[in-house]
């Protein structure tokens, strides 16, 4: 420990709001510990939290370096998230335009903090930190000793405000509202941008808290969660992946600790997930995911959990939104790969087959194929035939073009057959159609052919500017829905506007490419083949 550093824990306790209260503080310096406490006959829990911090800081000399731990998110956030700066600018009025309660104590805290270097640290509920539990007991003891039960019959049945669940707002009446958030299913570029938008939108505009559950629905079941603040989301806008982690093999309704293999082998732990949401005092759970994750979210909404969905998938196959974030980034990655493969195909006079993701929808193959100048685009919505593929390659050779680029979606299949799956133990995954097509072309034409399976390259890397903006807009809209009390909806893009639709509409079916669509017709108009007669 630095010789001038103080470690401080503070807590307040109150029976009723207003009502009898007590406060306590534990101060450590150079190996020594000091406990201080006090009480008040008619006060609020917020005032006791502030009083504890004031008295603790007064016990330290000016110029001290202090780490102050509190389980009051309200107290910590006032300093860490610049609420105090806004109050001063607005004449000690909160975001609602109301006078800030306990201004006298806030002013004392501000002055004391200016004279010291204070790091404000939020700790979890009393069961998670022994020092915090100790100072909580100290505050409760001060309440009882300062307000003897014999002197006040109403104190015989004291109930305490639990700061691990609810928080007073600036007026000292309402609770500091909490949102939960998780990322489920496969990862994709833009997840961090959404998390950032939700956290910043909630804390900057409405002074709310966001609780992040780690590793998708697994964190919900196992209660693996923590408060996410502005500092946590700093610098993540351009980062791929998700700071919360994700999983596509953890179903709370069919749960196994080591992940589901898509057979019903686990147990229903949805009740545990709901209990954990309530433990954190969460009023709404934001689920960022594709059809699988949003379907689970919809099931939780049936259990009474308020849900707001945010559509995420590189496949762009959710029917209730024009576009999902992550799709543009995946198309950009695939297009760049096709551009690079184009030059080697031309140099070696080869047929190059590029397999892209998309599951049972051909959006990535269609758009990346068009953007990359694919000669043949093969998608699940239009079953292919080898004769038409060979005819296209042969026609190109007759016109002096000695190479061809074929872009194929992983869910594509030959007419009269089924999609190709790879068996990984008990798990079946789409993929492998690209190499099969490549081998068949070489066998039938004698031309050298190579297949490249892009796979998870399309999920990784930095999101495009389009996805960063779309993800930000989605996250902000989710916070707005929460503030308006509109739950069990999914945010979506309709034209140029961010809107919302009922969650049950969001998980109804799969959006697939229309073979008669303008995009398909445009591709055909420039000579692109879809491996069949259209």
Image (cartoon, rainbow, N blue to C red):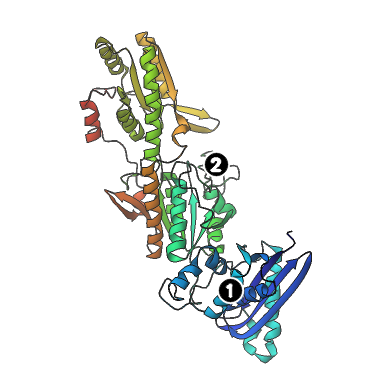
Q: Position of residue 338 (x, y in %)?
A: 38, 26
Between residues 245 and 107, which one lies in front from this camera angle?
Answer: 107
Find residue 389 and name its label: none
* Residue 429 horizontal/vertical position (percent): 47, 32
Which quadrant is home to the N terminus? bottom right
Whether 44 is drawn above or below 350: the answer is below
**Element marked by disc 2:** loop
Residue 324 versus residue 90: which sits nearer the camera? Answer: 90
Give residue 443's position: percent from left, percent from top. 39, 10
Question: Could one spot residue 246 in this view of the protein?
Answer: yes
Q: Identify the image quadrant of residue 197.
A: bottom left
Residue at image point 36% right, 43% down: 466
Q: Is residue 1 left or right of residue 488?
A: right
Q: Tell which circle, 2 or 1, labels the residue nearer the N-terminal end.
A: 1
Give the answer, above or below, for where 213 lies relative to 51.
above
The 10 Å Cα crowd at callout 1, few under 14, some 14 to 19, many 20 or more, is few
In the displayed orientation, state which residue is furthest to the bottom: 151
Which of the two residues, 349 or 267, is positioned nearer the viewer here? 349
The residue singled out by tag 1 in the image is: 111
Farthest right residue in view: 31
Which quadrant holds residue 384?
top left
Q: Is residue 488 above or below residue 326?
A: below
At mark 1, the secondary structure is helix
Work out which quarter of the rendered image holds the C terminus and state it. top left
Q: Nearer the viewer, residue 6 or 352?
A: 6
Relative horizontal placement of residue 484, taking residue 85 as reference (left or right) = left
Q: Which residue is mark 2?
A: 260
Are dots 2 and 1 in contact, CB under 8 Å?
no
């Amino acid at each position: 420990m630095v010789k001038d550093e103080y470690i401080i824990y503070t807590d307040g306790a109150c029976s009723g709001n207003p009502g009898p209260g007590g406060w306590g503080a534990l101060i450590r310096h150079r190996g020594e510990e000091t406990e201080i406490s006090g009480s008040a006959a008619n006060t609020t829990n917020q005032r006791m939290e502030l009083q504890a911090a004031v008295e603790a800081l007064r016990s330290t000399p000016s110029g001290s370096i202090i780490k102050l731990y509190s389980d009051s998110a309200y107290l910590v956030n006032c300093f860490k998230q610049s609420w105090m700066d806004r109050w001063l600018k607005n004449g000690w009025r909160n975001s609602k335009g109301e006078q800030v309660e306990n201004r006298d104590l806030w002013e004392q805290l501000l002055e004391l903090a200016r004279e010291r270097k204070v790091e404000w640290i939020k700790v979890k509920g009393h069961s998670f930190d022994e020092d915090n539990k100790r100072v909580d007991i100290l505050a409760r003891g001060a309440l009882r000793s300062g307000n003897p039960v014999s002197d006040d019959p109403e104190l015989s049945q004291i109930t305490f405000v639990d700061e691990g669940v609810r928080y007073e707002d600036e007026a000292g009446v309402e609770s500091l509202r909490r949102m939960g958030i998780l990322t489920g299913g496969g990862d994709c570029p833009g997840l961090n941008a959404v998390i950032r938008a939700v956290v910043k939108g909630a804390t900057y505009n409405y002074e709310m808290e966001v609780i992040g559950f780690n590793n998708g629905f697994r964190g919900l079941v196992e209660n693996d969660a923590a408060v996410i603040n502005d500092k946590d989301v700093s610098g993540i806008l351009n980062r791929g992946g998700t700071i919360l982690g994700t999983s596509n093999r953890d179903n709370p309704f069919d749960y196994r600790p080591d992940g589901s293999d898509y057979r019903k082998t686990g147990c229903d732990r949805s009740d545990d997930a709901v209990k954990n949401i309530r433990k954190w005092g969460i009023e709404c759970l934001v689920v960022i995911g594709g059809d699988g994750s949003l379907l689970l979210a919809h099931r939780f909404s049936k259990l009474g959990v308020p849900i707001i969905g945010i559509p995420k998938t590189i496949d762009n196959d959710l029917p209730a939104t024009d576009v999902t974030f992550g799709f543009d980034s995946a198309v950009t990655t695939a297009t760049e790969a096709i551009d690079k493969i184009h030059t080697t195909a031309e140099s070696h006079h080869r047929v190059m087959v590029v397999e892209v993701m998309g599951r049972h929808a051909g959006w990535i193959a269609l758009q990346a194929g068009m953007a990359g100048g694919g000669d043949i685009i093969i998608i699940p919505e239009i079953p292919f035939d080898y004769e038409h593929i060979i005819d296209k390659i042969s026609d190109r050779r007759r016109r002096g073009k000695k190479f061809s680029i074929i872009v194929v979606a992983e869910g594509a299949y030959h007419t009269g057959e089924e999609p190709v799956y790879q068996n990984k133990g008990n798990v079946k995954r789409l993929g492998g159609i690209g190499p099969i097509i490549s081998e068949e072309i070489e066998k039938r034409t004698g031309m050298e052919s190579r297949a490249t399976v892009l796979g998870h390259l399309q999920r990784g890397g930095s999101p495009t500017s389009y996805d960063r903006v779309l993800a930000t807009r989605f996250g902000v809209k989710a916070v707005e829905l929460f503030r308006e009390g509109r739950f069990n909806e999914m945010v979506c893009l309709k034209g140029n506007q961010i809107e919302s639709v009922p969650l049950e509409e969001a998980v109804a079916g799969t959006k697939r490419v229309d073979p008669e669509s303008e995009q398909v017709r445009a591709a055909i108009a420039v000579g692109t083949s879809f491996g069949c007669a259209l």
